[in-house]
Image (tube, rainbow, N blue to C red):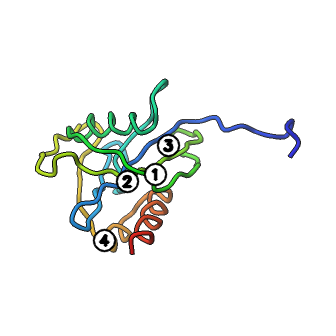
Amino acid sequence: MDESSEKHFNGKVAQKAVIMKEGKVLLIRDPREANEIWELPGGRMNEGELPAEGLARELKEELGADFQIGQVVHLEQFFQHSDQKNALMIAYLVTISDEEAAFTLAEAEICKIGWFTPKEALALTLFPEYRRTLEIYFNQTN
């Protein structure tokens, strides 16, 4: 490809968590979304932050608990229509540091959480990039 015809990525980076417990995945709903759409927890990476560090920070802010960030499950570039920007999503396998810890939700960012079996999760309305992430993860673990 001729370098003059290249268009470099310009967008945000979102790091997301695949959190499993007893065969179920944790999904959240954002109160800012008009539709009943479920998402993976996580958020945007800040300047000067490593993606895994940013994910740990976001999860602490959103859920009020500590997590161990594991391996990357999936990454994907997509166009986020709500912001009209390109985005790169990095999804990690994440474990809860203390499985007995109660979540304290950041109500401005999370209005509902749920634990779903793989079949239940894939039957929900999900953003396409999160659906692909879960399909990849569930296919790897079966």
Q: Which class describes the residues within 10 Å of circle 3: few (<14), some (14-19), or many (20+)? A: few
Residue 75 in the image, given as x and y percentages of width and height: 53, 51
Tell me the number on the disc at residue 120: 4
Closer mark to the observer between disc 3 and disc 1:
1
CB contact under 8 Å: marks 4 and 3: no
Q: Earlier in the sequence, mark 3 or mark 1?
A: 1
Q: Is label 4 or label 1 in front?
A: 1
Q: Which residue type carries mark 2?
A: Leu
Residue drawn at the location 45% of the way across and 62% of the way down: 131
| Nearer the camera: disc 4 or disc 2 | 2
**Quadrant location, the C terminus:** bottom left
Helix, strand or loop at mark 1? strand
Image disc number at residue 82: 3
Mark sitting on residue 88: none
Compare marks 4 and 1 and give the one earlier in the sequence.
Answer: 1
The picture places residue 127, in percent across and down from the top left corner, at 45, 57
Residue 101 coordinates in the image, percent (x, y): 12, 46
Relative to 36, 11 lies left or right: right
Question: Residue at left 44%, top 69%?
Answer: 140
Q: Which amino acid does label 4 sit on?
A: Glu
Q: Which amino acid does label 3 sit on?
A: Ser
- Give the foreground label among 3 and 2: 2
Marks 3 and 2, the one that precedes in the sequence: 3
The CA distance from mark 3 to mark 2 is 26 Å
Crowding at mark 2 (Cα within 10 Å: few <14, some 14-19, many 20+)? some
Q: Position of residue 132 (x, y in %)?
A: 49, 63
Q: For marks 4 and 3, give the CA distance.
A: 26 Å
Q: Which mark is residue 72?
A: 1
Does the CB distance between marks 4 and 1 fall below 8 Å? no
Residue highlighted by disc 2? 93
Spatial CA distance of label 3 from label 1 is 25 Å
> Mark 4 to mark 1: distance in Å?
23 Å
